[in-house]
Amino acid sequence: MAIISTSLERFRSYHLQTLFFLFTATFCGFFFLRAIYRITIHPLVKFPGPKIRAISHLPHAFSGVAGRQPYDVRELHRKYGPVVRICPNQLSFITPSAWEDIYGHAANKKLHKYGYFKVRPDAQPMLTSSGDDHTRQRVAFAHGFSQRAINDQESTLTVHVNRLVEKLEHEARRGQNVDISEWMRFIAFDIIGDFTLNTQFECVENRKYHPWVALLMNWFRAVSFVTNANAFGQLTPFIMLFAPIKHLKGMKDHLDMSAQKVRERLAVGEDPNRKDLWTYLLRNKGDKALSLAEMEVNAALLIIAATSPLSDVLCGTIYFLAQNHEIRAKLRKELEELMGLEGRLDMAITARSPYLDAVIKESMRLYAPVPGGARRKTPQEGHNISGIEVPPDTIVTVYQLAAYTLPINFALHDRFIPERWLPADHPERPKETLGDRQDVFQPFGVGPKNCIGKGLSYAEIKLIIARFLLRFDFELVGDGFEIDKQTAYLFRDRPPLNMKLTVVKK
Ligand code: HEM
C-alpha cells in the first residue's frame, strides 16, 4: 500500500513539474516569439528607436512611474530624430506638421482619443467625449470662453489678483521667503473655482489649500499612477494593487461636490449682477443645451484641466524672470510705458505688450505646462503623418517637452530668449533664431479638441505676471527648482520655488 502511495506521489510531482515546465516554456516562448515579431515583421519596424522599446512597453511604463517620461522621450528624439518608436505600438513625432496631421480638423474625423477613461457612467465631459457629443458640448461652451465673456470676467479676476498682490506685499514686508509655487497654485484654484463653480476656495486669503483643493491635488497624483499602470499591459492588475485607492476615491467626492455647486448655480438662473460661464451656457436651448449630468461633469473636469497648467506657466515665468534681470527690467519698462499712456494696468493693456507675450511664450517653451502629449489612435486604413505612412491602430503623440527643447526645432534651444518670438524683421530678433520651427510650439494643442481655455489663460497669465512684476522685485532663494530634475506625470509635480520678495516703491 505504502509503495503504491509513494509511486502515486512521485507520479503527481513529476506531472506537476512537467506542467510547470510546459507552462513556463509556453510563456517564455510566447514572449520570445512576440519579441522577434515586434522587431522583424511588425508594421512599425521601419521606424527608428531602441530595440528594447520595440519589444516591450515596460521601459516607457517605468519611465512614466518615475515621472521621467517626457525627458526620456526627449533623449530618444535627440538620438533617433523627429519620429521615434517609443513603445511596440506607439510613435512620437516632434515635427511641426504632425500637429495638424494628428490633431487637426481633417485628422479629428479619423483619429480617436486614446487613453482617457470614463469619469461618470451617465455623462462624459468635453475633454473625454468624441464625435457629435464632443461637438455639441464644445459649441455650447464656446460663448462662455469668447473674448466678450473673458472681458466680463475681468472685474472678478481683478479682485483675485488684488488680493494676491496684497497678501504677497504682507509676506514681503515680514521679510519671509515666499514659496511662489504654492502661491501660484492658490491663485489658479481661486480663479478657476470662481469661474467654473462659482465657489470661493479662498486659498490666497487663507494662505492654505481649501480641503477640496487638497483632495484634488492628491487625485492628480493618483490618476497619474493609473495612467502609467495601464501601460504595463498584462501586468496592470498587479500594479493596480499598489494604487492609492483612497486618493482615487477622491474623484467621487469631487464629482459630487461639483454637481452640488452646479445645481446651486443653476437655481439662480441668469445672474443680473454677474455674467459667468453659466450665463452663456444656459442660453443654449433645445438640442443645443447640455443635460444636467453633462453640466455637472464638465464643471468638475474644467477645474482639473485648468488649474495645473495655469499655475505652471505663472510659476515658470516668474522663475525665468528671476534668473534674467535684464529681461525683467526690459519687460517692466515696456509695461510702464504702456501704462503711462493709459494710466492703468488691465487686460486691454497687457494684451498690447509684445514683449510680455514673448516672455510668456518662451517660458512655456522651456517649461511646457503639458510636457507629455495627448494620444490618438490611427484608423483602420492607416494615416499619413508628416509625409510618412503610419499603419493602423498605432498610438501617435507629439511630446511637447521634446518638441520645444531640442536643437532640431529651436536654435540656442536651452537658452531663455524671449526675443525669438518677436517678428522676423524686428531689430532685436536674434538672427540665429530666424530658422526656429515656431509652428511646432502649440502648448494649447491644435484642432477642434484644442484647449478651449486658451484665450482665458493668456488673459489671466498676462495680468497676473504684469501686476506681480510691477509690484515686486524678486530673487531666487536656493536652487531647488531645477527644471530638468522635476518629475512630470499627467502634469508637472513642482517643488517649492522659494523667493525673497521686495515691494517696489510706487
Ligand atoms: C496654460 C494653461 C493651459 C494649457 C497649457 C492647456 C493645455 C491644453 C491642451 C494641450 C489641451 C488638449 C488636450 C487634448 O488634445 O486631449 C487642452 C484641452 C482642454 N483645456 Fe486646457 N490648457 C490650459 C488652461 C485651460 C483653462 C484655463 C481651461 C478652462 C477654464 C482649460 C480647459 C480645457 C478643456 C475643457 C479642454 C478640452 C477641450 C476639448 O476636448 O474640446 N484649459 N488644454
Image (cartoon, grey):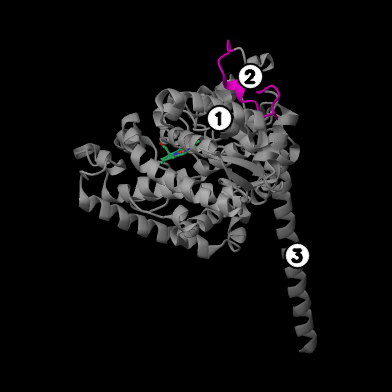
User: Residue at (61%, 12%) from the top-left corner?
Assistant: 427
Residue toward you, 11 or 337? 337
Q: Secondary structure at mark 3?
A: helix
Residue toward you, 289 or 169? 169
User: Given this view, does label 1 or label 2 mark the residue nearer the observer?
Assistant: 1
- Does the Cβ of the disc 2 residue fall within 8 Å of ligand 1? no
N-term mark: 3 or 2: 3
Residue 186 in the image: x percent, y percent?
49, 51
Q: Looking at this rendering, what residue extends furthest in the bottom direction?
A: 1
Amino acid on which the number 1 mark rests in the picture: Arg
Residue on which disc 2 sits: 436
Q: Tell me how far mark 1 sits from mark 2, CA to CA.
A: 26 Å
User: How many C-alpha atoms fall within 10 Å of the one at disc 2: few (<14), some, or many (≥20)?
Assistant: some
Residue toward you, 100 or 328? 328
User: Residue at (39%, 28%) from the top-left corner?
Assistant: 348
Q: Looking at this rendering, what residue extends furthest in the front direction?
A: 505
Amino acid on which the number 2 mark rests in the picture: Asp
Residue 243 visible, this angle: yes
User: Residue at (48%, 45%) from the top-left corner?
Assistant: 165
Within the magenta stretch, is there residue 423? yes
Q: Tell me how far mark 3 sits from mark 2, CA to CA.
A: 63 Å
Within the magenta stretch, is there residue 389? no
Checking the image for residue 18, the label placed there is: 3
Residue 409 horizontal side relative to residue 158, left or right: right
Amino acid on which the number 3 mark rests in the picture: Thr
Residue 1 horizontal side relative to residue 143, left or right: right
Residue on which disc 1 sits: 332
Magenta stretch: give its range: 409-426
N-term mark: 1 or 2: 1
User: How many C-alpha atoms fall within 10 Å of the one at disc 1: few (<14), some, or many (≥20)?
Assistant: some
